[in-house]
Amino acid sequence: MPTRTARTAWTGGLQDGTGQVELASSGAGKYDVSFPKRAADAADGTTSPEELIAAAHSSCYAMALSAEIGNAGATPRSLDVTADVTLGPDPAGGFRISGVKITVRGQVDGLDAAGFITAAEAAKAGCPVSKALAGVDNITLDAALES
């Protein structure tokens, strides 16, 4: 499997510095980052490590869930996955990712609500990004079929 690369160029200190993250492997874009905006309620046009982790988790989870649905003999028509990643204080000092909430709504042919929940839980356990985030104390899942 390939290795993917992102690069950040940073200037200045934590509070007054700024950076730009580049999705180098794909060339999909460059995004501004700053700690004050990372810690603020409004992102104001900048991204953050938490938003990038949320993007990675939601896309990885969608792929894992589509695989689990297929393994159950069903067909996903649509999956809408949101990952909310929260930055919080670390009791040992500094900060840490204190929680991740995955919300998924799906339209699936050939699977009832209980089967969908089973596939959703299996995807949460099997998604490589979920595994990478195993140190996060609180990863929750809200999964439901839509008609």
Image: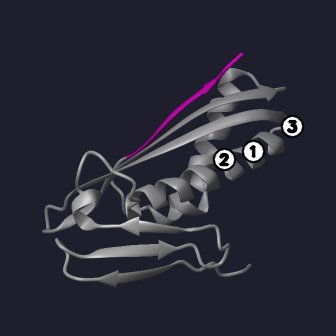
**CA–CA distance between discs 1 and 3?**
11 Å
Residue 46, numbered label:
none
Span of residues in magenta: 139-147
Percent position of residue 57, x then y: 54, 55
Do callouts 2 and 1 mark residues in contact (Cβ within 8 Å)? yes
Which residue does the numbered mark 1 point to in the structure image?
66
Whether residue 5 appears in magenta in the rendering, the answer is no
Q: Quadrant of residue 16?
A: bottom left
| Residue type pointed to by label 2 | Ala
Q: Is residue 117 left or right of residue 14?
A: right
Whether residue 146 appears in magenta in the rendering, the answer is yes
Residue depicted at x 68% and y 73%: 26
**CA–CA distance between discs 2 and 1?**
6 Å
> Of the residues under marks 3 and 2, which one precedes in the sequence?
2
Q: Quadrant of the C terminus?
A: top right
Residue depicted at x 67% and y 22%: 113
Q: Main secondary structure of the magenta part?
A: strand
Residue 62, numbered label:
2
**CA–CA distance between discs 3 and 2?**
17 Å
Q: Is residue 40 above or below residue 24?
A: above
Q: Quadrant of residue 13?
A: bottom left
Q: Nearer the viewer, mark 3 or mark 2?
A: 2
Which residue does the numbered mark 3 point to in the structure image?
73
| Residue type pointed to by label 1 | Ser
Do callouts 1 and 3 mark residues in contact (Cβ within 8 Å)? no
